[in-house]
Amino acid sequence: MNSEEEFYDAETGICLSAEQCNEFYVCVCVFRTTLPAPMFSRNDFSVWGFLKKCIGMELSKITMPIVFNEPLSFLQRITEYMEHTYLIHKACTLSDSIERMQLVAAFAISAVASQWDRTGKPFNPLLGETFELTRDEEGYRMISEQVSHHPPISAFYSESLNQDFSFHGSIYPKLKFWGKSVEAEPKGTMTLELSKHREAYTWTNPMCCVHNVILGKLWIEQYGTVEIVNHSTGDKCVLNFKPCGMFGKELHRVEGHIQDKSKKKHQVIYGKWTECVYSIEPKVYEANKKAEKKSGGDSKKHKDAPNSTGGDDADEMPDVQETVTMIPGSTLLWRVAPRPPNSTQMYNFTNFAMTLNELEPGMIGVIAPTDCRLRPDIRAMENGDIDTASREKERLEEKQRAARRERAKDEEEWSTRWFQQGKNPYTGASDWIYKGGYFDRRYPHLPDIY
């Protein structure tokens, strides 16, 4: 765990260190590196004309115009948590629990990295919609299902192909519009189990805010405290995703520490969720902080604060400050993979996101008929046909409403297929538990949702 050197494969979308290239098999699989059509212009749409009716409301209960969307379902967006699965594979090989926690923390931070500059809204999944992803070359498979429509809850389960780990959870994204910004609270617990070490880790994701949805340049910040608990050892990692702050110097920054069950601090974690994350011994970190303060390292460089008044002006995006400066003695835990050169024309997708809606040869008849790769509205939007996408979105939403009315008339309850409601075995909180069976490929009684 002391290598700065990393290798990124643009074809596979895998970012590996030199160690990992030797330790894990890598099959070269060719995935697409672009979408069929670039994103459309939003300039002709009056955002304010629609959103002024929604101030203070929860947006998940409102039918949004397709102009707000990107051509992925929220189930596919959840799957982006798995982009840096190599961190979990590496954690499985380590004998020290603090070192494992470092990589679990890096994985939790990396899971939100793809949201940087992703200002399009994923499509709301239809009730019963599913998405599966199997990546043999990265050693895992994943299934997700939309288990509830009101409130919207998405459940997912992933596992390594050699049974080293499972990663699962359920997410209820609460969205609120506050006049100039949209705030997203991703309610729900993430659970990672490392079978070899008989360990279970849980955490919740930070808050996300998209600024300037009405006027000005859109920009995103993540903020809040994320607490990762190892329920087997009592180790804990407390991460602070810092809000932008008055002068913008904290934008994208993450800082925290790892402590054992006696609350002794073992490592400090620092970096940016958009860039990279390091770990270092607490004494070295504090000495560096004191030296910085003494030399005026954080002096008053910034003269003008971003406009954060309640007026009609945009919330000015702060200049992104210097990249993360590595403190001598630090260990690199994770670095974000570069985005493709055409990313800005492709909804700011990462290489990994670019592949998620690809309908590969041989998939039809193998994946479930409820898989969101088969959704006609998302497919039409991806192909650049916005009029068809809009019509199909309206048709699917009306079909879902009609099905709900029929169930109400027959006093029939909706039955989930692959997950059942229960309690998280480690936190006791409400959760959705994978029942198994999806990859047996028996799908005769699935609903016709498309």
Image (spheres, rainbow, N blue to C red):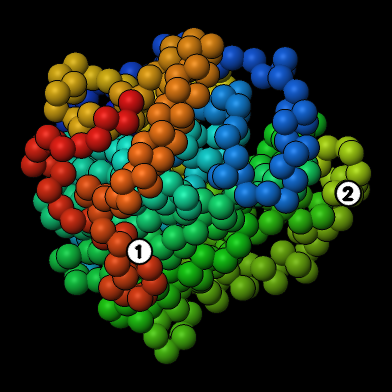
User: Relative to 392, does residue 277 appear above or below in the rendering?
Assistant: below
SS for callout 1: strand
Q: Is residue 352 visible?
A: yes
User: Relative to 286, does residue 121 appear above or below in the rendering?
Assistant: above
- First along the sequence among labels 1 and 2: 2
SS for callout 2: loop
Give percent across and percent down for residue 96: 27, 72
Q: Quadrant of the N terminus?
A: bottom left
Q: Is residue 14 visible?
A: no
Q: Residues within 10 Å of mark 1 (few under 14, many from 20)?
A: many
Residue positioned most to the front: 409
Residue drawn at (30%, 80%) of the image: 233
217 sits left or right of 309 in the view: left
User: Relative to 130, does residue 197 appear above or below in the rendering?
Assistant: below
Q: Which amino acid type corresponds to the residue marked 1 in the rendered image?
A: Asp
Indicate the quadrant where residue 429 lies.
Answer: bottom left
Give percent across and percent down for residue 386: 53, 13
Who is closer to the viewer here, 432 or 240? 432
Residue drawn at (41%, 40%) of the image: 405
The residue tagged 1 is 431
Give percent across and percent down for residue 329: 49, 62
User: Relative to 28, does residue 431 appear above or below in the rendering?
Assistant: below
Point out the frontmost of discs 1 and 2: 1
Residue drawn at (48%, 69%) of the image: 227
The residue tagged 2 is 310
Give percent across and percent down for residue 239: 53, 65
Q: Quadrant of the C terminus?
A: top left
Residue drawn at (60%, 62%) of the image: 224
378 sits left or right of 435 in the view: right
